[in-house]
Image: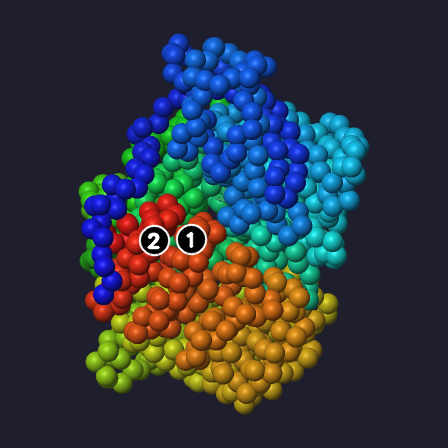
Amino acid sequence: MSQVTPITEVFEAKPQEKLLSEYRVAEFTVSTLDLEFDLFDNNTLVKATSEVQRTSKHSEPLFLFGEQLKLVALMVDNRDYSDYQLVEGGILIHNLPDQFTLQITTEINPQSNKAFEGLYKSGDAFCTQCEAEGFRRITYYLDRPDVMAKFTTKISADKTLYPALLSNGNLVAQGELDNGRHWVSWADPFPKPAYLFALVAGKFDCLKDTFTTKSGKKVALELFVDIGNLDKTAHAMLSLKNAMKWDEQRFNLEYDLDIYMIVAVDFFNMGAMENKGLNIFNSKFVLANAQSATDQDYLGIEAVIGHEYFHNWTGNRITCRDWFQLSLKEGLTVFRDQEFSSDLGSRPVNRIANVKIMRNNQFAEDAGPMSHPIRPESVMEMNNFYTLTVYDKGAEVIRMIHTLLGEAKFQQGMQLYVQRFDGQAVTCDDFVAAMQDASGIDLTLFKRWYSQSGTPQVNVSDYFDSTQNSYQITFKQKSLATADQKNKQVLHIPVNLELLDGDGNAFDLGNGRRHQVLSLTQKEQTFVYKNIATKPVPSLFRDFSAPVKYQYAYSDPQLLHLIHFASDDFSRWDAGQMLFNKYLLINVLQKKSNQKMALPPVFIEAFRSVLISDDLDPALITDMFEFVSEAGAMELFECVDIEALHHAREFMLEQLAIELKDEFVSAYQNHQVTGDYQPVSADIANRKLANLALLFISRADPLAANKLVITQIQQSDNMTDHLGALLAANRGQLDCRDKVMSDFEDKWHHNGLVMDKWFSLQATSLDSAVLSNIKALFQHRSFDFSNPNRLRALVGAFVQNNPYYFHASDGSGYQFLTEQLIKLNEQNPQVASRLITPLIQFKRLDEHRKQLIKEQLNRLLQLDNLALDLFEKVSKALTQ
Ligand code: TRP
Ligand code: ZN
C-alpha cells in the first residue's frame, strides 16, 4: 500500500473552486484590442494595445489574467508604467485613470507548448486554441467571456515558411518586410470575447469555394490543409455549404462576414473550435476520401463542420456571460448539429446514436464523482467541464424544450432569443426566458434541469379495467443523490406515449391523436384513458423524450410487439435493447453462480424477425444488433462482476451468431454495394448491415468468415469495407488476422489518421497479451505520444473500450493508465484529464478493484506538480 496524504490537507494546499454564485460584473471593460504578433518558434513577441474603461465608480486596480508569459513592456497612455505587480495567475495594475490606452508586450514560446493551449506549433504551422482560458497564455488580458472587444490582428512571419497568415474577420492590409518576412493584418468587425480569437500561420494547400447567402451576399470559403491533402477536402467543403444553407432554411440564420476559413491541424486536443471566421479543426474532422475514411468518418465531419458553423450564431454572436453557462452555447449547438444530421440523413439512426452516447457514457458521468448539472455551480478547472453532461445532456434539455413547444414555437423562441441578445454575453436563464416569452408556455419548473444533476429514474406501472374499457398509467419519478448534490427535486419530464392494441395499431388518445406528450411534474402521477378496448402495450418515452432511466415490467411478448409495431423507430430499437438487457442481467447472474447460461427461443426469434424484416431500413436493422457496450452495461448493475458481464455478453452475441447464421449470410450477400463509393444514406446503410453480418459470421463460422474477409479486402475500394473486414478478423480471431493487420500497416503507416483505426483495433483486442502489445506499440513508427489523436486511439480505446482487460483483477490496466497520466500530467493535462475517466468511475466495481484503483489515484495525488485538471478529478474520486 502506498502512503496516503490526508485528503483535507491536499485540499488546503490547492486553489479553491470558483462558484457560479460569486459571479460579478467586470470592473473594467475593453472596447478595442489591437494585437501584433512577430512570429518566431521560440520567442514570439505579442504587442497588445487596448482601450480600457472602468465600468463603474470605483478605485480598484485592474487585474489581468496571464500565464506562462514573459512581460517585456507595459505602457499606459503611451508612457512606461511601473505601478503594477505580477501576481499568481496574472498582473495587477494600480492607480489607473477611468479610461486609458494600455499597451502590453509579452514574449511567449510556441515551440515548447505541448499543452496545445494558447499559441503553439502543430507540425510546421503556428496555431492557437483559446477556449476556454487559453488567451491568457498569449497576453495579459481580461480573459472572461463577458468582456467583448473589437479585435484587429497584425501578423508578421517568414514568408517562405508561412505564406498564409490568418486571423479573425476580414483581411485589411498586407506587405513585405526585410529578411524574407511579410505581414498581414485582419480586422474583425464583431466584438468578441478573447476565447474566440484565432491565429494561424503556415504553408497550406487551400480549397476555395463560395456561398451566396439568401440575402445575396457572396461569402468566400477557404479550407486550409497540409500540403498534399487537397484530395481529402471535398466532403468538408460540401458539409460547410450544406450547413450554411440548412441554418438559413431551418433557423433563418445567415452568415455575417465576407469570408469563412477552416484550417485543419494534426495536433489538437478536441474536435474543433468555432473561432470567429477562422475555425480550427482537428484534421480528423476534415480529411476524408473513400480510401482513407469510413462512412462514420464522413458523418462525423458533416456533424462537426455543422457544429462549428452553427456556433457563429449560437456561441459567437450570442455568447456566454461566464463559463458556468457553457451549455447555453454547447447544448444548443449540439442540438442544432443533431438536427442538421437528422435532416440530411436518417433521423432514427441519428437519434439512436445520440441515445447510445447518453446511456453508454453520460449516465455514468452523472452517477460518478464528477456529476454536475448542465449548468455547473462550482468549477476548479474549466477544461474539465467540456463534458457529455454539458454537451449531450445539454442538447437533450434543449430537445425537451423543443418537444414541449413544438417546432413552430421553438423557432419563434429562437428568433426572439437572437433579437434580444445579439451582440451580448448571456445566461441559460436568458435563453429559457426567450423560449417562454415567445411560446407562452411556462418553463419555471422545467428550469430545474439546469440546476439538478443525476439521471432521474421513472418507474411506470399500469392497470387495465376491462369492464370500463379504461386504462390507467402511473409514473413515479425519483432522482438519487449524486456526488455533488444530496437533495433532489421533482423535475418536469415530458413523456411521449403511444398505446398499441393487439394488432399493433395505436389507440386514439383523444381527438384522433395517436400519441401524446405527457408532462410529469409531480413525484407520482396517474393518467387515465377511456375507450381503450383491450389491454394496450405502452410505448414509453418515444424518441427518448427525456434523458431518464425508465422501467416498466414488459413481458417478452410485449417487447416483441413493440419491436414489430411501435410507430417510432427509436422505440422499436429501444424494445430490442430492453430485451437484450433483460437477458444480460439474467445471464450474468447465471454465470456468477456457475449455472448454465441460456437464451429463450422468443429472444432468438425476435432478432431473427428483425434481421429478415423488409420494412426496416438496413441501417436500423444493424442498430438493433448493436447492443449496450460492455462499459455501458456496467451502469445496469449496482455492483458489477466484470468477468461475468464480459462472458455473458459474449455468450449472447455468440448465440445470436450461431442461431441466425444463415440469416447473417443472406444479409451479407443481399447488402453488398455495387458501383463507386459514395457516402450516401442508402449505401452507408447497406455497408453497415453487410459488415455487421460479417462480424457475426466471424463468431459462428470462422472458416467461412476468413474467406469473406480476404475477398472483401481485395475487392473493396473504400475504408469502410476494409475496416469492417479487419474488425471481423480481430473479433473472430481469424487465421488471416495477423496478415491483414500487417498488410494494412504496410500500406498506411505514413498516415496517422488511418493508423489510429489500426491502433484502436490493437487496443481493443481480446487477446490476453493485449496490454503488452500496447506497450510495444509505443515504439511503433506511426505512434507519437505527443499527438492527442494517437493517444486516444491507443490508450483511450484500451481504457474505454476494452473494460475486460482494463479492469483486469491484477490491477495491470489501472497501473498502465496511471503511468501514462503521470507522463502526460506536465505535457498535456487536458488530454490526461479526459483519459482518466474510467479510472474515476469505479463506484460499481467490487471492493478489490476499488482498492487497486484508489492506490493508483493516490499515486497521482502524491505528485508534487499534479495539474489542476487531474487534481480536481482525482480528489473528487477519492472523496465520493
Ligand atoms: N467550443 C469547442 C466546440 O464545442 C470545444 C473546444 C475545442 C474546446 N477546443 C477546445 C474546449 C479546447 C476546451 C478546450 O466545438
Ligand atoms: Zn461547440
In this picture, is 86 found above or below 353? above
In this picture, is 598 found above or below 466? below
Label 2 Cα neighbours within 10 Å, binned few <14 / some 14-19 / many ≥20 = few
| Secondary element at image label 1 | helix
Residue 416 is at least partly visible in this image: no
Give the image location of residue 65, x and y in percent. Answer: 45, 30
Circle 2 sits on which residue? 863
Say if mark 2 contacts mark 1, CB within 8 Å.
Answer: yes
| Secondary element at image label 2 | loop
Give the image location of residue 294, x and y in percent. Answer: 61, 64
Q: Residue at x 28, y 57 (%)?
A: 858
Q: Residue at x 67, y 73 (%)?
A: 747
Circle 1 sits on which residue? 825
Give the image location of residue 496, x and y in percent. Answer: 37, 49
Q: Give whichever of 347, 89 is nearer the camera.
A: 89
Give the image location of residue 516, x and y in percent. Answer: 37, 47
> What's the residue type where badge 1 is placed?
Asn
Q: Give whichever of 142, 413 is nearer the camera.
A: 142
Q: Residue at x 52, y 34 (%)?
A: 70
Label 1 Cα neighbours within 10 Å, binned few <14 / some 14-19 / many ≥20 = many
Q: Residue at x 47, y 36 (%)?
A: 67
Residue 154 is at least partly visible in this image: yes
> What's the residue type where badge 2 is placed?
Leu
Q: How many marks?
A: 2
Identify the residue at the far bottom of this view. 703
Alpha carbons under labels 2 and 1: distance apart: 9 Å
